[in-house]
Image (cartoon, coloured by chain):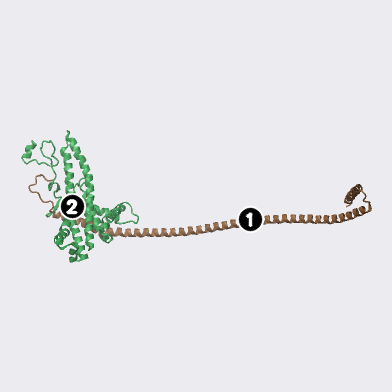
Chain colours: A green, B brown
Amino acid sequence: MAADLFAAGKFACNETNSHLGSSSHCGYPAPGYPASFTYGALFRIGSFTFNKPMLLACICAVIVVVFFWSAFSKPKLVPRGVQNLAEIGIFFVRDQILRPMMGKKGDNYLPFLVSLFFFIWIMNIMEIIPAAQFPPMSEIAFPACLMLMVYGTYNYIGIKNQGLGGYFRNMIPRGVPVGILLILAPVEILQYTIVRPFTLAVRLFANMFAGHILLLVFTLATWYLLSSGIGLLWSATSFILTIVLTAFELLIQALQAYIFTILTAQYIGGSLEAEH
Amino acid sequence: MPATYLAASSPNPLIPHWPEFIIGTIAFLIVFILLARVLMPRINQTLSERTEAIEGGLKKADETQQEADRVLAEYRAQLADARHEAARLREAAKEEAAQIVAKGRADGVAEKQRIIDAANAQIQADRQQALIALRSEVGAMAVELASKIVGESLADEARQSRMVDRFLDELDSETSARAAAR
């Protein structure tokens, strides 16, 4: 009966009605792109569509702002509560990311790195928050906009500190034989101008993209395999894996925020110093 | 959620959706500008104030410590002085006691010597006196004996011996009588 409806195009399989052994004969709804990453418009302004990832990005920005506002709007000499927590956060970024990469002269860039780290981290955490359950960073647009700001920043600082010619000259290692230089110079310039920004954005994007699909695979499987028979065992296995992978993703989320920020610090630090 | 999982043509996930790009940029910039312009300067101010406060506290503690050290050193010096003084007094007292004992002993020895000397002198004098008296008496007795010997006839030895015996008896009795008379 249901199969007839499906054949007639009046019945469509989705995550909810796909069930192993159900009369709909729907297969496993494997997650993928763009299906698992496309959301309908929440509202439109002309051709501008506002969707769930955008809403999440705004909520994340609000969370970060509210957190730091409640911590630092009226800072106390003896820190209490949220201020303590936020201080631990900025000290982490300063001492584990900024100082090792840029030294003390990079302290001016602390607000940028703190914003990057916490914005990315909170955005990533949305991957496992119930109801949100989507990392906006798995949409290339979000990592790309951050990457463009980092790209602009480190190039601007490099050109300002070393001059346009000096900046490009410093990209190329010194003391290399001419023959090798012919190969090395284009590679190095490519590295600075294209590879760095591309990898910076894609690394974050791909990790979140893969994480989202990974969680979906087992979340959907838990539902798809659920039955009163032996399928319960398979469903339970999927469920346990979902939980384990959620914990794993929690680690990945922080790690990716850390990597993005530390690479930013490294790039800006490199631009501050002329030596290669 | 989309209605189908069979995408006709796979779109490239690396092509950004511009509305998302714009919203992402705005969201991040809001966070960044608020942090960079308002919140981080505030917390930096507080952090430097805290550093100053801690440094001030440390300085004060340091000063207090130095003061305590100074006072302690002073007390130690005073204590050492007092100990030194006590030791000195003890030493002096010991010396004085030894002196007194030595002086007493010397005095005793001198007194003993004096008494012995006096006794010896007395004995010597007595002896001298006795000698003088004895000598005069022995002289007189010798003279008397000689006159008696000359007066008697010295015919035989028996007589002589009898006469000597008699003389000696007389002398004996005379001596004892004289001694009793003295």
- What amino acid is labelled 1 in the image? Ala
Indicate the secondary structure of the residue bearing disc 1.
helix
Tell whether A142 sits left or right of B125: left
User: In which quadrant will I find the C terminus of chain A?
Assistant: bottom left
**Where does residue A123 sit, x and y in percent of width and height?**
21, 51
Amino acid at pointer 2 = Arg
Which image quarter: residue A94?
bottom left
Mark 1–mark 2 CB contact (< 8 Å):
no
Of residues B129 and A21, the one nearer the viewer is B129
Screen quadrant of the N terminus of chain A: top left
Q: Residue at x 81, y 55 (%)?
A: B127
Whether residue A54 appears in this view of the structure is no
Q: Residue A190, position in %: x, y? A: 15, 59
Query: Quadrant of the rendered structure where residue B49 is?
Result: bottom left
Real-space CA distance between mark 1 and mark 2, rounded to the nearest whole angstrom: 99 Å
**Frontmost residue, A227 versus B79:** B79
Q: x%, y% of residue A116?
A: 22, 55
Q: Chain of mark 2?
A: A
Secondary structure at numbered mark 2: helix
A10 relative to A264, above or below? above
| Chain of the residue that carries numbered disc 1 in the rendered image | B
Q: Quadrant of residue B98?
A: bottom right
Looking at the image, residue A131 sits to the left or right of residue B12; the answer is: right
Q: Residues within 10 Å of mark 1 (few under 14, many from 20)?
A: few
Report which residue position mark 1 lands on: B98
State the residue lying farthest toward the top: A229
Give A39 or A215, whichever is nearer the viewer.
A215
Q: Which residue is mark 2?
A: A203
